[in-house]
Each structure stands twice: as structure tokens, then as C-alpha cells.
Amino acid sequence: MTVMSHLFYQSRQPRPTLDYGKGIYLYDTDGKRYIDGSSGAMVSNIGHSNPRVLDAMKAQMDKATFGYRLHFQTEPSERLAAKTAALMPKGLDRVFFVSGGSEAVESAIKMARQYALTQGQDSRWKVISRHPSYHGSTLGALALTGYDPLTKPFAPMMREMPKIAAPTCYLDTDNLDDDQRGLKYAEMLREEIIAQGPESVLAFIMEPVGGASTGALVAPDSYYARIREICDEFGILLIYDEVMTGAGRTGKFIAAEHWGITPDIIALSKGFAAGYAPLGAMVARGDMVEAVLDAGGFLHGYTYAGNPLACAAGCAVLDEIASQDLVGNSAAMGDLLKARLTGLMDRFPFIGDVRGLGLLLAFELVSDRKTMAPLPKELNAYNRLVDLAYERGLIIYSRRTRGGLEGDHFLVAPPLIVTEAQIDEIMATLTDSLEAMAREMNL
Ligand code: PLP
């Protein structure tokens, strides 16, 4: 029987009805328990039903849930801006709140453009990004996104932006060492800037650790420093899309800290309010914001932006991350989980790569580990393994994408509160699911 509902999202596929969540677990209305092994879409960083956050939200609800930002400042939004700025690299001290990741990215590119105008750089408007990548679903963010199935249908409706290859070094067969590989991919930015005409290029945007698009792709260290140098050489703004990587997900508060990079603008969302409220932020250099305000103000905004309820939730989330040292736990449990996932390669020859940082981890399936040839598309492994795990009460997140080729990768990214015993539980269910898939597909 077709399930009819007024509500619709991507497909007609019905899903169990969520009842409640507690810690790293979610429960449906039939009482089945699921380990939230992907924190939803890498969102629920502090786990579900955190009492500190719920109390802070309830207290704020009793006072005010909305005050329009052009009429009032609110105490939670001021407090959250200060807390956020304190966690950013020096100089990035101005915060613009939004309600999600796409809005944070839209805000970042508009801030970049308006700042360029204040510098008399009217010719600069192109934002170079990477392929594959994901920066959001609104048309501006989609134009930066390198994922053809999502972008192609809308191509005539948006101004597509130039792309360079994401640093998929794990697929490279050349004899370069890591350092050289990082530089090789970074030079692609330099070449693209020159090809486009440096005076037309406004910014470069990248996910410091790839998310769903590349499956936790981490570049060699040399890449990050060289990208910053190249942007500086041509006066191009560097935007880090930390929507997924921010708020401790990779074992630092923001991933940029791993390489000591100071971007010009950072986009945050997801773990920033950890699923307790729709919230994101665009954090920019103070001098850029001052220039834009001097020139008449930022020509961009969202009605719900900076509402006190979402900001109260955000404050409590940041307090919880600090008081429980969840950034430290993300690093420690991330190392442990990555070692355990790598261990699966001994048992399952079809796991070709395990990668990631902190608790943003992924493994990729291949038909041949030497050539890294992907599994045949018809096997539909990226859906099947997710379903097998789901049946067994484990949620993981998958995509089929990989540069020009196609590959099945799976993100394992539990809440940052995860314990060693819970990692054992995740691994037992995942192993069982992989075994079931191997049997089914004769792998
Ligand atoms: N940027 C990155 C890196 C993301 O991973 C996402 C979402 O997955 C977005 C932007 C878009 O965020 P949202 O879905 O909250 O609009």
C-alpha cells in the first residue's frame, strides 16, 4: 500500500517514526533502539536529550523565543557570539547567525563579495570550489557544490562556479610522497586562478575534511599551507566550510586548527547547536566586517537569524563541549574507532580505504584494493550496507561518489560523547552487517 502523507522529502520510502533519543541512542515508536552512528547527518555532537541544553532552552522559552534582530539585541545571541569568537583563530571575531549550513555558506560568499566591493575590486566574483564537494542546497551554495546528481538539474538556473579536483590522494598511483601529493593538488588552485584570470576570482571555498561528498577526505598537511599561500599571493579570500567539521567533530574545535590555518571566513552549523535548534554561523575577519558596515551594511539576512532560543541552545551546547572536554574525547575516541575500522581491512578485502580525523571517519568499498576499482554500481552497496546496519540497530551514512569515478563510502561519526564500550557496540554491529553484505553479494 502506498503511504500517503502531506509531508514529503526525498522519496516515498517510509521510515520508522522517531519517539525519543537519549545519549548516542534513538528509539522508534515500536521501541526499537538505534545507535546514532552518524549523529544524524553529523549533527548530534553532544548526543540526544542533554539535560543542560534542554534546561537552558526551557529557561529561555519562559522569557522570549523571538525578538527580531533589527528591533532588539538579545542576551543569548550576544553571549553566543562572544563564545564563538573566543573559539576562532585570532582576527575572526565577528559572528553572523543563520539557521543552517546552506545559509552560512550563502552568507560567507556574500560577505566576501561585499568586502571585495569595499576594496574597489568589483571585477572579483568567482568562487572556486572543489569537485566532489558539498556546500548546501540553496542555489548559491549549490553553485559551489561539486556533486553532479544534485547540481545538473538546476544548472540553467544558477551561475556555476569553477571547480578544481578535491585531493583524492588515496586513489593516486604516481610515485609522489604525501607532501608532494598535497602540493600537486594545491597547485591546481593556482592554475585555475590563472586560467580564470586572477582579477575575476573572489574566493576559494573548501571543506577542510570532506564530509558526505568525499567521505572524510583529509589532504596531506602540505596542501593546507600551500592553499593559504596561493590565496594570499592573488589576494583571494579563503573560506573554510566547517559546517560539518566544526564544533569538535574532527578532534579540534574547528578543523583549521589541525594545520594552524587562519581562513578569512568560516561557515559553521550542524554540531554548533548539535540538533537542539536550527542554527549556524558565518564568522568573518573583523576588518572585513567593519569595511562592509562602513560602506552601508551587510545586504543579507534571514528573519530567524540569531533568535534567542536557538542561541540559548548554542550557548549550552558550547558549554557542554567545554565542560565534558568533548573535543578531547572526539580526538581520543576517533583514534580508537579509526584503528578498529582499519582492523576491519584484515577481515574484509573489499574495504579499500579507511580515513578521517577525530570522529569524522569513513571507509570505502572497492572490488580490488590494489587498483582501488569501485564495486559495480548494480550491487548498490552504499544503500544495502546502510539498510543491513539499520536493521541491526546501527545508523551509518553513505554516498556513492568519488571524483570522476564512482565509489561507495560510509561515514561513521557517532556523537562526541561516545565511550569505548559504545565503540565496541558499533564495531560488533558493523562487522555483522559487513558479513551479511559479503554473504549476500559474494564478496
Ligand atoms: N556545508 C557542508 C560541508 C555540509 O556538510 C552541509 C550539509 O551537509 C552544508 C554545507 C549544508 O548544510 P544544511 O543542510 O544545514 O543547509
Image (spheres, helix red, strand yellow):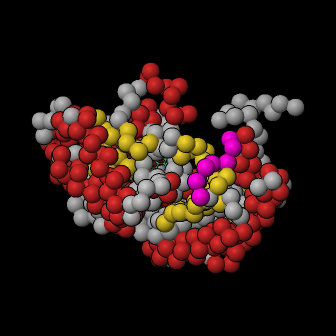
Residue 385, horizontal then vertical, whole percent: 73, 53
Instruction: Specify the quadrant that holds the N terminus.
Output: top right
In the image, residue 134 lies at what x, y percent? 47, 44
Residue 374 lies in the magenta-colored region: yes
Residue at the far front: name it. 175
| Quarter of the rendering occupied by the C terminus | bottom right
Q: Nearer the viewer, residue 359 or 77?
A: 359
Q: Residue at x 38, y 49 (%)?
A: 206
- Where residue 37 sits in the image (x, y, percent)? 65, 62
Residue 135 appears in view: no
Q: Residue at left 66%, top 67%?
A: 345
Can you give x and y, in whole percent of width and height, for residue 365 in the image?
65, 55
On screen, residue 234 versus residue 220, left or right, reads left
Residue beneath the point at 65% across and 72% down: 343
What segment is highlighted magenta in the picture? 370-377
Query: Which residue does the image show at 21% across and 34% down from the upper left?
Result: 197
Number of numbered discs? 0
Residue 78's image quarter?
bottom left
User: Does residue 338 appear in the picture of this structure?
Assistant: yes
Q: Which residue is the extreme one toward the right?
A: 1
Q: Magenta segment, principal secondary structure?
A: loop
Residue 397 located within the stretch drawn in magenta: no
* Side (left or right) of 443 relative to 117: right
Up-down relation of residue 59 to residue 423 (above or below): above
- 331 in relation to 148, above or below: below
> In this orientation, which residue lies closer to the viewer: 51 or 22?
22
Residue placed farthest to the top in the image? 156
The answer to which of 211 and 443 lies nearer the viewer is: 443
From this view, report whether residue 44 is shown above or below residue 251: above
